[in-house]
Image (tube, rainbow, N blue to C red):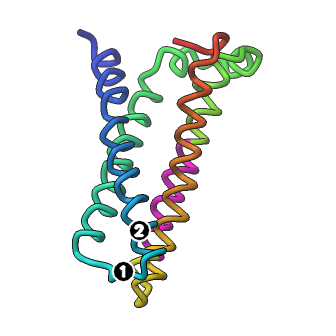
Amino acid sequence: MESYSLLLQAHSGWRYVVMLTLVLAILMSIAGWLGNKPYTPGNRKINLFALISAHIQFLLGLILYFISPLVKAGDMAIAMKSDALRYWTVEHTTMMLIAIALITIGHSKSKRLIDSVAKHRTVAIFYTLAFIIIIAAIALSGRPIIGR
């Protein structure tokens, strides 16, 4: 199996790890925020696991991007005229970069806070926004004109 196909399968499969850890982090943060619960080492770990899994996914995606036949062809003028090519070379990448930035910012901001409820609220808001963007990016890839 060529490296591109192998990485594509790894990237596709790893998304489930990312989604699971994000959902767990979001649910635990919402419960902590609304329930006025203390921010525990367990909260910190699941938030960190979500951050790490998302960064691994992003790195896999970046590697895929640069070894992709779409990018190697190098004609971005043609790519911009095609819905499918534009989606995979620009839109998907941009949406995922924004999601990673939100996760990273949310995690960093929560680490600097002292109040448990504020930590939970920060993670809940930033991780949820990132999750929505990720879901949107995945859903858009299923449009008939864009599909693989």
51 vs 120: above or below: above
133 vs 38: above or below: above
| Between 35 and 70, the one nearer to me in the picture | 35
Q: Does dot 1 land on a helix, a strand or a loop? A: loop
**Place of residue 6 in the rendered image (x, y in percent of width and height, measured from the top left):** 28, 19
The rendered magenta stretch, by its main secondary structure, is classed as helix
38 vs 102: above or below: below
**Residue 136 colored in magenta in the image:** no
Quarter-of-image position of residue 52: bottom left
The residue furthest front is 35
**Place of residue 96 in the rendered image (x, y in percent of width and height, measured from the top left):** 53, 42
The residue furthest right is 81
Q: Which residue is mark 1?
A: 37
**Place of residue 139 in the rendered image (x, y in percent of width and height, measured from the top left):** 58, 28
Instruction: Please report the bounds of the magenta region as a residue range.
Output: 96-109
Q: Does dot 2 land on a helix, a strand or a loop? A: helix
Disc sitting over residue 94 in the figure: none
Label 2 Cα crowd, 10 Å radius (few <14 / some 14-19 / many 20+):
some
Kind of residue at disc 2: Ala
Q: Residue sitting at 46 percent across and 20 percent down?
A: 68
Task: Say whether marks 2 and 1 touch (CB < 8 Å).
Answer: yes
**Residue 98 colored in magenta in the image:** yes
Kind of residue at disc 1: Lys
Q: Which residue is mark 2?
A: 31
Query: Quarter holding the N terminus?
Result: top left
**Sooner in the amino-acid sequence: mark 2 or mark 1:** 2
Total numbered labels: 2
Instruction: State the CA–CA distance, disc 2 to disc 1.
Output: 8 Å
Label 1 Cα crowd, 10 Å radius (few <14 / some 14-19 / many 20+):
some
Quarter-of-image position of residue 70: top right
